[in-house]
Amino acid sequence: MEPKTLFDKIWDAHVVKSIVGGPDVLYIDQHYIHEVTSPQSFNGLKQRGIPVFRPEKTLAVADHNIPTIDQELPIRDELSRKQVEKLAENCKNYGIEFFGLNHPKNGIVHVIGPELGYTRPGMTIVCGDSHTSTHGAFGTIAFGIGTSEVEMVLATQCILQPKPKKMRININGRLQKGVTSKDIIMYIISQVSTGGATGYFVEYAGSVVRELSMEARMTICNMSIEMGARGGLTAPDEITFKYLENHPFLLNKTGRETFLYDQAVLKSDPGAAFDRELEFNADLIRPMITFGTNPGMAIAIDDSIPSTDDVNPEESVSFVKSLDYMGFIPGMKMIGHPIDYVFLGSCTNGRIEDIRAFAGMVEGKNKAPNITALIVPGSKMVEKQAVDEGLKNILNKAGFELRQPGCSSCLAMNEDKIPEGKYAISTSNRNFEGRQGQGARTLLASPLTAAASAITGRITDPREFID
């Protein structure tokens, strides 16, 4: 039998029908929805008199528009409140499970899916959100879809989808001091570019990936989309299954055997063909930070911003425009530049491991007086765990407040916006113009870099605080 990639194994097992010269009809195991991209989809069903085909395969959550303080009160912003109320109404009408504001299982959709056991190896998963690729960390084919496709999945539990090409990225070597999974994926994007994986589905492999926690793998898969990939995945292993076993919701819902029986085959076969293969040496990766207005504009934190001579002539105009927006100049050093805000959270870095890392660095120290910090857990479960482990107390003593769960300052759809002209070190996934608020200047970095900078009030190499 011809060797197959993990991606091919999952994809081929879910093809309902192949259209000659066209896309495949792909069955979807798990569908996630939220308040932003679902209203029009439900409206389409209503207009056509179509029911949700398999409501038990869809899980809804409110996350993008919700506040992260005073969640016990009605949402102040009228549009946000109406979107959340409409999602609740649609879920009630169509029999869909909904974890709304103040529900004990509420949180960011790409955080609660894995922690509640809805995301399991070998699945196909979609959501009307580009960072659905997060779930690929569990050995799934997970990708974002548009509003019309959300309606298609609600109506049929299938989607029309062309099969992407396959790329494998091998990361070997040894991680250096202060380097996290966020730095790994930012380094890769800086090398590949924001369009370097367009048309591909990426499998991450190598000794470094095999040693990473599930939280770290989710961070890497989450940002696959930022280099143009359709999605990213890693092969499940004992780390994966231990994570799943430690989540009682999964055991109560499905039992161990449902996600273990395919363990032996949920990996790429030796000799399986990839359309493109890349190799990266972890020894060369240092803590990273962005300096521009896309995730590919990133450098090691102790490097200087490139000069215009080092930039492709076709990109020089946008390069200069980006630096003008950020208030930077070619050749300048990033370290020491004053910042105003620090954001820890999002579906990229809002998990308990991220809060542990941040709290561990700020313990016994104090937040710089010029810093406004938004420390936002990715879910109610993460929030509770941070309290139970004493992390909230550590943060409070250092001058930080643990807020309530939500997408928060990842994007300007809620109250947690960065003011115009202010600099924010953010552990989220995008630094586009206006992403965190009109005129906001976003610097993407890891939780460790965010913590170090929150202490000093300026861009700081986290290795300064690591023995």
Image (cartoon, rainbow, N blue to C red):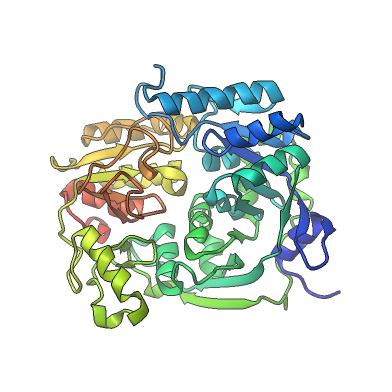
Residue extending farthest left: 369
Quadrant housing the N terminus: bottom right
Q: Residue at x 50, y 31 (%)?
A: 381
Q: Residue at x 45, y 42 (%)?
A: 351
- Pick the front one: 394 or 163: 163
Q: Residue at x 25, y 49 (%)?
A: 439
Where is residue 128, by image quadrant? top right
Q: Is residue 249 visible?
A: no
- Pick the front one: 267 or 18: 18
Where is residue 388, by image quadrant? top left
Where is residue 336, by image quadrant? bottom left
Vertically, is 229 above or below 116? below
Residue extending farthest top: 73
91 displayed left or right of 54: left
Measuring from the top left, give residue 112's x and y in whole percent. Answer: 55, 37
* Number of numbered tags placed on the structure image: 0
Vertically, is 281 above or below 243? below
Measuring from the top left, give residue 83's x and y in whole percent. Answer: 50, 28
443 displayed left or right of 329: right
Measuring from the top left, give residue 333's x and y in whole percent. Answer: 18, 68
Vertically, is 174 above or below 28? below
331 displayed left or right of 385: left
- Pick the front one: 177 or 22: 22
Q: Is residue 408 visible?
A: yes
Measuring from the top left, give residue 259's x and y in whole percent. Answer: 73, 46
Quadrant housing the C terminus: bottom left
